[in-house]
Image (spheres, coloured by chain):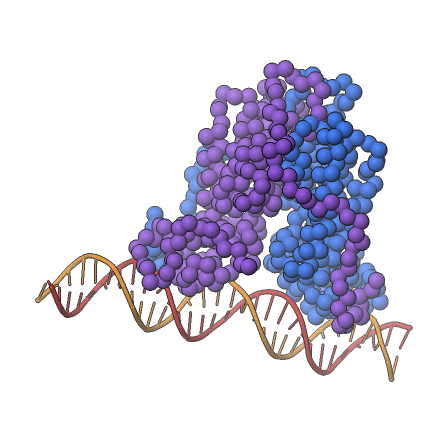
Chain colours: A purple, B blue, C red, D orange
Amino acid sequence: MVKRPKIAMEPWKSFQVRKRNPDGKRDAVLLTAAHLFLEQGYRRTSMSELAKRLNITKPALYYYFHNKEEIVVECYRRGIAVIEAGLGDALVSHAAGFDKVKAYVEAYATAVVLHEFGRCVAMLDDGALSATTRREVRSLKRRIDATLRGYIEEGMKDGSIANCNAKIAAFAIAGAINWIGTWYQPGGPLSAAEIGEQFSLLLTEGLHRQVARAPERKAAQVDLSKTAMVALVRPKPETLSRSQANGKHDRGHVE
Amino acid sequence: MVKRPKIAMEPWKSFQVRKRNPDGKRDAVLLTAAHLFLEQGYRRTSMSELAKRLNITKPALYYYFHNKEEIVVECYRRGIAVIEAGLGDALVSHAAGFDKVKAYVEAYATAVVLHEFGRCVAMLDDGALSATTRREVRSLKRRIDATLRGYIEEGMKDGSIANCNAKIAAFAIAGAINWIGTWYQPGGPLSAAEIGEQFSLLLTEGLHRQVARAPERKAAQVDLSKTAMVALVRPKPETLSRSQANGKHDRGHVE
DNA sequence: CTTTCTTTACTTACCGAAAAGTAAGTTACC
DNA sequence: GGTAACTTACTTTTCGGTAAGTAAAGAAAG
């Protein structure tokens, strides 16, 4: 019933086996923590639960990390490193702004889909952090956001991107990608490549059927037959079911 | 220092004034709760804090609501009602799929931006809810999602929308809109109308400069001079600052 | 090679704070 | 006086974090 995370490495598979491998164990803590944080949120995840998943006790965690916040911040840092590495690989500095945005979207989306830590950056609420730590995380995030906005402005200048509000456009694109973490399931029917492709297609070319497309750019079309489209719930005319009337003290509940 | 919510109505401005107006007070609880939930999350918001903002004591809240969860669920319900009302207003049943999507985007974005409860639906994590309640909320949310997906599929059939993966496209659009709640500030420089307009423009027409646009459709262009573009942080070449070395037990922290 | 000492890597048992929720008493209006 | 609308005082649980002790793996000494 309980969904076990399929983590290959298990440095704590038995408490008898105590290899001296602090780096590996730190990594294991972070990866398991990221899993739990993404599954049920930062505050909902207790240190005891995290320890239990690792087959150790809670104070052992405090041997590797000073406190809970340090764990989540390290997840953020690794995620941002993953994302920026992906962005760096994908970009060609002499390309037009439009192409940079496209590369950005694919790289960012891939990082968010494929890496747990990338998803941490996208999804985890930094509101639970202390003031100083939150400042650091926000500044790192803002750097990524500002990069995208810069590319959009670049593209508007060089004529490859239509006139628009770069700030809002950057927010919209980042939002669409960050949101992936809420619906994407690693074992699900949608592959990372397909998601990245569709995202860059939608966000750069739009939904609108282009009657007369510019000749030099051809949007990649996707063969729908190969996408595993699962049957999904359609809009049902069910009435909004009120919460089941619990017999107890119903005074004050006016309806 | 503390950011006070500017709520016009204050049914508890003094505990001396005890009017008999249970409906209004319930509303005040919900609105204040929505404010706090959006500001700092559901779990981080305590019933005591909510009570304090309303100038009452914690048990008084339990006079109007059975428990904390009932409050947040009611926020969800009202938000969904707001969104579906907006959707209903904006839609013309005989329009093409593309135009329905466009209307959907504008209506949904407006609901999320303008209404606290709408933002609750978009932003609040339903992971903290109990199993039965979560099922209800998810089913309501899914209905909204499925509506959008239906419009996209419709548009692909009637030829107004380019061939794409409707499922992913719907997720991307919903994600971009839902994410508004993380960056939008009610008093900020961006107006609801502008956000709605830019969103529908970006998501339906894309960023790409259209060299030869279909003649019968003209994308609304936005005058950039009227948008208050604030100066924003640019990508700085600062190094990733590690957490300040706290002198205490540094064993085990390998670097 | 054995004994002892040191460090690593934990464990058990506990503390204090915070937070959801309750019991029972109190005030003010009709 | 009766009921609506609260308050004060309390219980229980959960959770982050700590104090103190301990088993195992080397390193050093004899």
Vertical relation: B224 (above or below) A4: above
What residue is at 32 percent from the left and 59 percent from the top?
A: A18
What residue is at 72 percent from the left and 30 percent from the top?
A: B156
Q: Position of residue C11 (x, y in %)?
A: 38, 68
Q: Which of these two is toward me, B182 or B216?
A: B216
What residue is at 65 percent from the left and 61 percent from the top?
A: B130
What residue is at 53 percent from the left and 28 percent from the top?
A: A103
Residue A156 visible, this angle: no
Circle count: 0
Q: Position of residue C6 (x, y in %)?
A: 23, 62
Extreme front residue here? A225
Q: Which of these two is toward me, B201 or B38?
A: B201
- A45 sits left or right of A163 in the view: left
Q: Position of residue A245 (x, y in %)?
A: 77, 66
- B240 sits left or right of D9 in the view: left
Q: Position of residue B106 (x, y in %)?
A: 75, 37
Quadrant hosting residue B145: top right
Residue A18 visible, this angle: yes
Vertical relation: B132 (above or below) A98: below
